[in-house]
Amino acid sequence: MAKFIIAHDLGTTGNKATLYDQEGRLTGAVFYPYETEYAHTGWAEQNPEDWWTAVCQSTRQLLQETHVHKGDIACITFSGQMMGAVPLDRDARPLRNAIIWADQRSLVEEAWIGEQVSFEDMYRITGHRLSASYSLAKILWIRTHQPDIYRATYKFVHAKDSIVARLTGQFVTDPSDASSMNLYDLETGQWSDQILKAVDLPVEKLPEIRQSVAVVGEVQPAAAEAVGVAAGTPVVIGGGDGACAAAGAGVIREGAAYNYIGSSSWIALSTPKPIYDPDYRTFTFGHVIPNMVMPTGTMQAAGASYQWTRDQLALFETEAAKALGISAYELINLEIEKVAPGADGLFYLPYLMGERSPRWNPHARGAFIGLTIRHSRAHLYRAVLEGVTMNLRVILDAFRSQGTPIEAMRVIGGGARGHVWNQIMADLYGMPIHRLAILEEATSMGAALVGGVGVGLYPDFAMIETMNEIASTVLPDPQTQAVYEKMVTVFNNLYTALVPVYDEIAGL
């Protein structure tokens, strides 16, 4: 019996190929990088042929390094970057570079769509604001500027779907990726007739929507030769990277939530119904878990704020850490622990790159407010972590205001390693923080979980409880909670007061 799963995570910087066994253990991992092209301001493209090369090379290397025979592979499954546009012909070959999630060129198309579909209808149907970040505006940009490519396109798909089509000949996607296109109806689980008609986009140019656990085909002989697996190996479609990360973090049932802390950060839940925030602060993706969705709020500069602090303020700690052979963050955290919660009234607004959720303000800028002669560098360090976490608290409050039950917060990502930040989260969120055993492999693990359930190698999604156990729990401190409750109100008032100033700065 085949007993291994290959899970590919097609990210922004490269593809990570991982191998999981029938017990859910990670037994091998290979990373293969590729480039992003930034031809003009606001443009971001990747060559899908680079994705294909990455999948082929990393698969072969993975099997070679782990000494696993290709006949022992139960399935190949995928996670991938979301919100892109990949035009494929009938042979699953790309007709141009992929326009990826980071591309913002389609602002004119975004405005035009807004004239055809109201803001409220777009949010209610898709769970998302209208944005040039999503696939629809990018598809329409191709229609306007490259009509020959648009007419020749058989299907517009996402990164993982393009590889699946090349492996199997099947043009499919899943609810999580479909929901990142500004085209997916969350309530019906299908492409939105209303939006398609409004923008005159034929549904025939979109892939079929299948559940993430679906075996959508088998690896065809020609593809098998290139990739290095056996022809006939089942392929499970998998999901978008955010939804796979949710599954890998164990957020598979109502009441569960996770907080990813990387350069950016997000909080995501698992719920049976979408959450429609009256102030449009959050958005909702489809999930890889059947009959569930994933309400989400994403901020821009979380770990990026911490990294900026390290690079610009913590020069002493950085040099000392090099001499000691440890991370500079370890020394920074020691300094933070010397300062009482609240940083003696010092606030940090974490808007180094504008802001998405919860503010949706590209003009927002970072700031330290309340600085006095008594404050030290250590105060600045603590204020940064507290300010980032207060901003995430606003996202959490948006979900809570809808009566959504959240029992605890699971944390993943590199930024989740430090105990001091975990404690700040516990105190600001007012709930236990569960730090998982595996912090930075949750995405590929979630894809493997989906694949394993899809082919019956894993009994159900509860398998994740043993694949990625809770390593430690941090509980909130009531005294610190009282301090932070007052600060959150001031934090929000500071942002509101500065909005006119941000607009003035943008005009300079």
Image (spheres, helix red, strand yellow):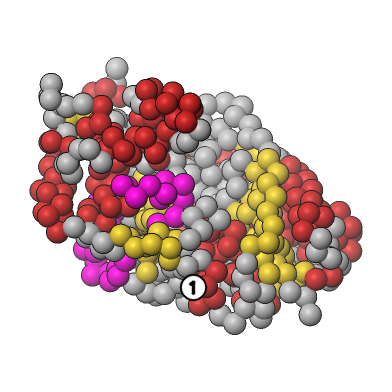
Residue sitting nearer the eye, 111 or 320: 320
* In the image: residue 71, left or right of residue 496: right
Figure check: 433 above or below 94: below
Does the segment drawn in magenta span residue 404? yes
Quarter holding the C terminus is top left
Residue sitting nearer the eye, 116 or 468: 468
Dot 1 lies on which element?
Answer: helix
Where residue 47 appears, x then y in whole percent? 70, 40
Where residue 272 appears, x then y in whole percent? 39, 75
Instruction: Residue type at mark 1: give it.
Output: Glu
**The magenta segment:** 394-421
Where residue 476 appears, x then y in whole percent? 22, 59
User: Label 1 crowding class (10 Å Cα cut-off): few <14, some 14-19, many 20+?
Assistant: few
Kindly tell me whether residue 390 is visible in this rendering: yes
Disc 1 target residue: 465
Does the segment drawn in magenta span residue 410? yes
Look at 43% across and 66% down and name the residue there.
470
Kindly tell me whether residue 124 is visible in this rendering: no
Look at 62% across and 67% down and name the residue there.
25
